[in-house]
Structure formats: structure tokens, C-alpha cells
Image (cartoon, rainbow, N blue to C red):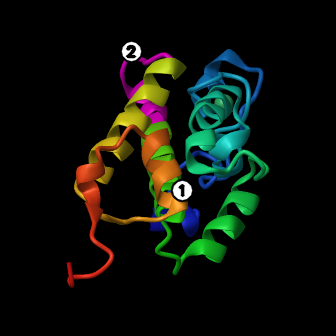
């Protein structure tokens, strides 16, 4: 995640080379859509394929209204960095998991002939976050109840509001 924030992931624009029409330069194109450049801005999440994955998960993160550019998403994350609200913790997890699996898929398609459909990527992101949520505990509130229903989490993950009773 920090490598992405610092834009240090080794996309090919970092090496100062861009996608071109020339067939010999296909490697420099985004391996997800084969149209845009292999750059951070494109991958997160302007690329048609990456964008469809992001659009498939952002509702579960309560981020439908955030524009799908990394600048806007990053700005939103900065604003909720210190929040412990369940919906904000989930938003951070969803962005991190989406970035991770988009990056992994980009590498997979670049270096192997295996590829996953966008729907599979959406499912992997959601199941990874759901698995992580099962290891956490939540304080009971109206917001938390809504989030737990959204993610089909068991009420057993709720902690008591106090220890008195
Ligand atoms: Zn692309």
C-alpha cells in the first residue's frame, strides 16, 4: 500500500516508456485492457478493467461518491486515517485489497498466460476483506449494525458496550 502511495510500484511509465501502437511495444501497454499506459494513474482506477473491479466493490466500502482517480481516493483515505468507525476501517481494507489484487493481476497477465475475469477479482477482494473482518470485533451501534448486515457478519463479532453486565 505504501509503495502505491509513494507511486513506487514498478509500472513501465516509471521507466519512462509508454504504450504505443507498435506491436513490438505491446508489453508497455496496460496488461489488463491492452489500451492505456502501464501507469499508476491508469491502473488505480482509470483502466476499464480495473475500474469495473473497483465499481464492483466500492459500494461495500461506502465510497460510491468518491471519484475513481487515485488522487481522490487517496484524499478520502487521508481523511479517515485515524477513524475507528467500522465503515471507515472497511473502506481502508477494501481499497488496500483492491489495489493489491489489481496489481497482482497486472503482474500475472504481464508475466504468465493466466488471467482472471473481473467478476472473479471482485469476489476475491470481497472474500479477502470478509475474512479479515471475521478476525475483528465491533462495538454495537446503528452504523455497525448496517455494516455488519451489508457484509453478512455474525453478531458474535460484537463486543459488549461495557463490562458491567
Ligand atoms: Zn488498462
In the image: residue 53, left or right of residue 139? right
* Visible residue check, residue 134: no
Q: Quadrant of the C terminus?
A: bottom left
Q: Is 68 or 103 nearer to us in this picture? A: 68
Mark 2, secondary structure of its residue = loop
Q: Residues within 10 Å of mark 1 (few under 14, many from 20)?
A: many
* Residue 15 appears in the rendering: yes
Tell which circle, 2 or 1, labels the residue nearer the N-terminal end: 1
The spot of residue 137 in percent (x, y) is 28, 63
Q: Classify residue 42 as left or right of residue 103.
A: right
Q: Is residue 31 left or right of residue 157?
A: right
Please determine whether, in this image, residue 161 is positioned above or below residue 118: below
Magenta stretch bounds: 105-117
Question: Mark 2 near ligand 1 (CB under 8 Å)?
Answer: no
Residue 69 place in picture, x, y as percent: 75, 51
Q: Is 59 or 23 nearer to us in this picture?
A: 59
**In which quadrant of this rendering is ligand 1 seen?**
top right
Residue visible at 73% across and 39% down in the picture:
46
- Going 65% across and 28% down the picture, which residue do you hit? 52
Residue drawn at (49%, 16%) of the image: 117
User: Which residue lies under the disc numbered 2?
Assistant: 113
Which of discs 2 and 1 lies nearer the camera? The answer is 1
Which residue is identified by label 1?
A: 91
Q: Which residue in the rendered view is the most extreme toward the front?
A: 165
Residue 122 image point, x, y percent: 49, 29
Amino acid at each position: 500500500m505504501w509503495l502505491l502511495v509513494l507511486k513506487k510500484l514498478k509500472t513501465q511509465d516509471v521507466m519512462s516508456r509508454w504504450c504505443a501502437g507498435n506491436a513490438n511495444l505491446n508489453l508497455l501497454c496496460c496488461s489488463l485492457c491492452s489500451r492505456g499506459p502501464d501507469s499508476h494513474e491508469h491502473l488505480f482506477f482509470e483502466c476499464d478493467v480495473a475500474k469495473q473491479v473497483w465499481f464492483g466493490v466500492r459500494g461495500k466500502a461506502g465510497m460510491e461518491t468518491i471519484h475513481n482517480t487515485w488522487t481522490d481516493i487517496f484524499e478520502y483515505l487521508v481523511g479517515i486515517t485515524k477513524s475507528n468507525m467500522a465503515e471507515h476501517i472497511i473502506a481502508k481494507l477494501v481499497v488496500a485489497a483492491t489495489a493489491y489484487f489489481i496489481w497482482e493481476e497486472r503482474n500475472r497477465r504481464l508475466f504468465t498466460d493466466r488471467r482472471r475475469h473481473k467478476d472473479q477479482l471482485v469476489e476475491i477482494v470481497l472474500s479477502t476483506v470478509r475474512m479479515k473482518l471475521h478476525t475483528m470485533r465491533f462495538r454495537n451501534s446503528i452504523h455497525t449494525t448496517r455494516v455488519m448486515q451489508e457484509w453478512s457478519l455474525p453478531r458474535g463479532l460484537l463486543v459488549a458496550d461495557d463490562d458491567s453486565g
